[in-house]
Amino acid sequence: MSVRLVLADDHPLVLDGLEQLFRLEPDLEVVARCRDGHETLKAVREHQPDVLILDIKMPGRDGLSVLRAIRDEGLATETVLLTAALDDDQLVDAVGLGVRGVVLKESAPRAIISAIREVRAGGSYLEGRAVSRALQKLVRREVTVRDAQRALTPRELEIVRMAASGARNRDIAERLSITEGTVKIHFHNIYEKLEIDSRVGLALWARDQGIA
């Protein structure tokens, strides 16, 4: 059975080159070509490809936005990023959104074919030193978050949730039947444990960790 592909890149020459390359492979079938993020998401919804070949820099919606939509909608499509450049933060975000294949455009043509087959088989194809650095950064970030959540007491986590929802110190004190002074002490301890110095930073942290 052939692997059904959607190609997404804003450069027609890249799309042409990929399609010609894949025509030489009997197990690869291109079902759609897209030149912006909106077209890409529409094509993934319509064709439900096995693998999406995606550039990170796309007009309309960038690659990360497309990946978030695919994840949020539960679309069963694997993604291989094919990009000219990718900084560590973008790569960390992409891997966090489920990307298991990354190929740089400067690589040999066989690399993208190998990546497609590896990802389709349930494996990963992450190319280059930059990818290794980014994965190490992702692991460090996840460990830091996990350790921070473990460091907070149940009461502190409760206060974080209330603060992230916009509750003031007085509101928190009333709900928990404690004094505002005690609330301030809790915030001091929370800030120290998370290395955060403001309510805004705390709200952003809570949102990012899904505990708001």
Image (tube, rainbow, N blue to C red):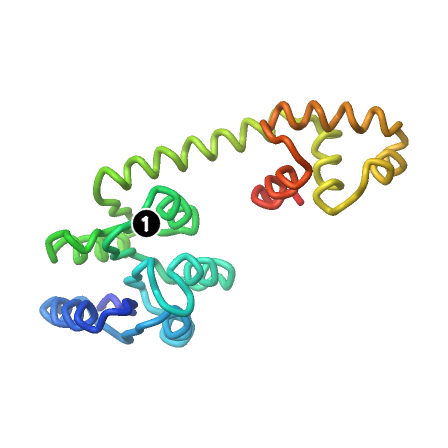
Q: Which quarter of the picture shows residue 49? A: bottom left
Instruction: State the count of labels.
Output: 1
Q: Position of residue 63 (x, y in %)?
A: 37, 60
Q: Which residue lies at the image location 34% right of the left edge and 38% below the top edge?
A: 135
Q: Which quarter of the picture shows residue 202? A: top right
Q: Which residue lies at the image location 86% right of the left edge and 34% below the top edge?
A: 173
Q: Which residue is label 1 attached to?
A: 100
How many residues crowd mark 1 within 10 Å: few (<14), some (14–19), many (20+)? many
Q: Nearer the viewer, residue 160 or 150?
A: 160
Q: Which residue lies at the image location 23% right of the left edge and 57% below the top edge?
A: 116
Q: Nearer the viewer, residue 96 or 9?
A: 9
Query: Is residue 7 shown above or below 134?
Result: below
Q: Which quarter of the picture shows residue 120? A: bottom left
Query: Is residue 62 shown above or below 46?
Result: above
Left or right: 50, with 167 as reference point? left
Left or right: 35, with 103 as reference point? right
Query: Is residue 129 shown above or below 33?
Result: above
Left or right: 196, with 67 as reference point? right
- In the rendered image, which quarter contains the C terminus? top right
Q: Secondary structure at mark 1?
A: loop
Q: Nearer the viewer, residue 174 or 30?
A: 174
Amino acid type of the residue that numbered disc 1 sits on in the rendered structure: Arg
- In the rendered image, which quarter contains the N terminus? bottom left
Query: Is residue 100 shown above or below 50?
Result: above
Left or right: 166, with 110 as reference point? right
Q: Position of residue 141 (x, y in %)?
A: 46, 34
